[in-house]
Amino acid sequence: MTPSIHLFVLASGSKGNAAIVQGPEGSILIDDGISYKALRTRAQEVAAPLDDICAVLLTHEHGDHTSGLSVFCNHFDGPLFATAGTVAGRSYLSEMPFELIQDNDSLDLAGMHIRAFPTSHDVNDPVGFRFDVIDGEGEIQDSLGWCTDTGYVTDEALDALYGCRILGLESNHDEKMLETGPYPRYLKDRVKGEGGHLSNAQAAAVLPHLVTKDTECVVALHLSEENNRPSVCIRTLAEPLGAEPTNTTFTEARTPDGLLTVFPASQHEAVSVW
């Protein structure tokens, strides 16, 4: 594929989420669960095009994905897109001028064709997104998949995420760490349930069904600070891909041919993928 989509993950985790997808004709903000000051600071750290954002997409209504949106909209007058269930899930969202989408809708924004797909979380109508740049002959030139906050990978997600050059996939927790960790029983059951979060093992299990010769980067999303570690996550995701560590801390792995890299997004530092 010819790279024409760039990803900037400004924050990913239970304390706040925000990412920018830059396309040929502008940029899209996915979720905004951090302060406006943090958003600008993180964007500056990785030269993300914050002032080039032409639309906002929400995956779901939880505060770690939406709490910064009200202030952001004081500086932004472009369209906002979310499902009806997401908008109804928070009173402050229902007061904003959202354009409602279904979990199988498509949009054309920033020079990209964007397809929504349903995920499985303990909210109404959560979604993930696939972004494609398509040439005049209908051929995909570049693609990015985004799937976070889901208890399992839905059939629609498996279809939408297949063969993306950049794949952002939740890898929230290590199952043993969750079971022996500090969370109360009800919260452990929620996290590992079908409406919870994807474990390292679950993410690793679907990667062989999603990764193709076109896939260059797998970004692990929404790592738990209590029930996961970047090294544990990357070791698990690397194994089915035949990837090997590129550093002593095992926070990045690469296939022997050098074509595919696996690394985690961070709660506290912005990362970029070109």
Image: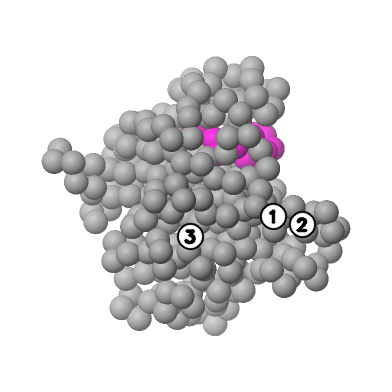
Between 18 and 38, the residue placed more toward the observer is: 18
Residue 115 — which label?
A: none
Amino acid, disc 1: Gly
Amino acid, disc 3: Val
Which residue does the numbered mark 1 point to in the structure image?
193
Which residue does the numbered mark 2 point to in the structure image?
189
The CA distance from mark 2 to mark 3 is 25 Å
Which residue does the numbered mark 3 point to in the structure image?
219
Q: Residue at x 66, y 38 (%)?
A: 123
Q: Residue furthest front?
A: 155
What span is colored magenta in the figure?
A: 56-68
Q: Judge the density around disc 1: few (<14), some (14-19), many (≥20) Cα neighbours within 10 Å.
A: some
Residue 55, picture quadrant: top left
Q: For the N terminus, give its image quadrant.
A: bottom left
Amino acid, disc 2: Asp
The CA distance from mark 2 to mark 1 is 6 Å
Q: Residue at x 45, y 22 (%)?
A: 78
Decide: marks 2, 3 in contact (CB < 8 A)? no
The CA distance from mark 3 to mark 1 is 22 Å
Q: Judge the density around disc 2: few (<14), some (14-19), many (≥20) Cα neighbours within 10 Å.
A: some
Decide: marks 2, 1 in contact (CB < 8 A)? yes
Where 235 sits versus 25, above or below? below
- Compared across the picture, whether 87 is left or right of 114 comes to right
